[in-house]
Image (spheres, rainbow, N blue to C red):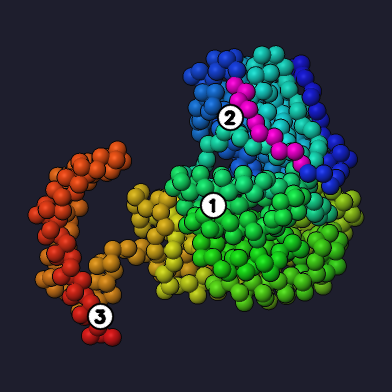
Amino acid sequence: MKEKILNKPDLKKAIQRDSSVSPIIYVEDNRSQKLLDFAKDKKYYIHTYGCQANVRDEESMRGMLESIGLTKTENREEADVILLNTCAVRENAEDKLYGEIGNLKGYMEKHKDAVLGICGCVPEEPEILERILKTFPYVNLVFGTHEVYRLLEFLEEVISSKKRLIAVESKSGEVYEGLPVIRTSKYKAFVNIIYGCNKFCTYCIVPYTRGKERSRKFSDILKECQELIDDGYQEITLLGQNVNAYGKDLDEGKDFADLLEAVAKLGIPRLRFTTSHPWDFTSKMIDVIAKYDNVMNFIHLPVQSGNDNVLKKMGRRYTSSDYLKLVKEMKEKIPGLGLSTDIIVGFPNESDEEFNDTLKLVDEVEYDSAFTFIYSPRKGTPAARMEDTISKETKGKRFKELVSHLEKSISASSERMVGQVYDVLVDGVSKNNEDMYSGYTESNKLVHFKGDESMVGKIIKVKITESHTYSLIGEVISDDPIIQKAKELKECLKNEPVLEEYLRIKAIFEVDESLKELRQKIAESKAKNEKDEYDRLKQMYDNHPLVINYYKAKEEAMELLKGLHDIIQ
């Protein structure tokens, strides 16, 4: 296959950093008639691996592809454009990618006009890119993390020239605004606030693949968040490789604590952020989290190791005592804090004593959840050049021991939640049991419960009934004040005629078609600002016999429950 090379990655360039403010580029509409004609009646498929940054990139790519008329499919065997959006953090992610590309060989041979693109972080690694190009000649588009905004340009080039296109430039990076977006969720959204990373932990490839730290403008972030709130979103997660570094590269005089507070004040029901580096975490940030109820009491704080010598070799910029001091302040200031972390097992030449320090820290912190990894070298990073004397068997044994220690605190955390009631944002049907629904508490605990489709995207109250260590089982608590009070006083209210009458009238009230029609007409007249018609319809509704009976029965039931409650008190 003929190929056109715009750029190939260079790790020496990728490591370069300067103090200049990254340019902000507001992207213009670049849809051509050729692309619009190509996309007619065609479909696209995207498979995203790895972190939330990749998920957010997928949303932009979806926006661009659908802007020209392509429709999304979950079946890659019917797609005209296939994009594999890759992750380079773990070695097995590359192995999965190679398998995925290999599985597409037959499909690409039968569909000569299809476009198979590889994007994300993996192409940013020179050796891996060369392997992809040599092993899989039917891959006809490769682009990196800095070129996402050029997707439509690349697509047009490939379909026009019939040549393989390679565009992977190692550079500090820019900030692109104005890309079309198709969100993967209608009620939970990721909002990028900062791209790239300057930390250069010795084991990590991300600073090479994502470029230098570059923050979005404060006003652009708030504008995006306000639009999400206006669209009815229930949860926003502020996103970055290191959100704590937000604003350091700008001259706006704002830091992450300022941004977190400003977004909280917009009124989003739930506000989260990820990921945080302990070195940049300030008391000011902790105070903002503690101050606002809609900032969730959950922090992901990667520690990686509990030994100071290993932390120094990792280039983490803090000691174990620094980390523990930070955790102590968080727990003192933030009620009900949920704390998670990342830990690497088997960093080159980690001794048994050094590993045991990690176990001690894990036991002291008592995490609520954790992501654990056996170290795998990323070519181009300093750690990959270190001699490693630890056997695979030793690493496996340590990994199991670490998980055992973690499960003690995770299990204890879950057990403490049994019997308590929590707010849960419902995601949908459980992935493990189609008869159950699931969602997350404010402290990011996964809960499964009996529910229905009407709950999806809403925040409901769930009482925890069982702990299964990594997830919880609960039962939905009704928001109806009458039903809630009735449950609390059920022994006193068996066969109570006042309550029975209320429930009977309530059931009729909720399904009556004439009332449904009236409510619809009232809403329409209000939306059209037709005041006279609105007043007329509202009066009809208020004077409807069923409405009068319903509110009378409700009032009597409330008086009954209040009286019983006062007696019990």
Left or right of residue 197, residue 12 in this image:
right
**Residue 320 in sight:** yes
Q: Residue at x 19, y 74 (%)?
A: 559
For this orientation, the residue located farthest to the front is 532
Location of residue 462 with respect to 224 vertically, above or below: below
N-terminal of the pair, mark 2 or mark 1, is 2
- Decide whether residue 338 is among the magenta residues: no
N-terminal of the pair, mark 1 or mark 3, is 1
Residue 64 marker:
2
Find numbered disc 3 in the image and state the secondary structure of the residue it sits on.
Answer: helix
Q: Residue at x 48, y 19 (%)?
A: 41
Which of the image's four quarters has the C terminus?
bottom left
Q: Residue at x 45, y 56 (%)?
A: 425
Image marks 1 and 3: residues in contact by CB distance under 8 Å: no
What residue is pinned by disc 3? 565
Residue 236 marker:
1
Q: Which residues are magenta?
A: 22-31
Find numbered disc 2 in the image and state the secondary structure of the residue it sits on.
Answer: helix
Three-letter code for the amino acid on which mark 2 is drawn = Met
Three-letter code for the amino acid on which mark 3 is drawn = His
Left or right of residue 569, residue 339 in this image:
right
Find numbered disc 1 in the image and state the secondary structure of the residue it sits on.
Answer: strand
Task: Tell me the quarter of the picture where residue 115 sits.
Answer: top right
Residue 302 point in image, percent of width and height: 70, 61
- Determine the CA span between mark 2 and mark 1: 22 Å
Location of residue 354 with respect to 563 vertically, above or below: above
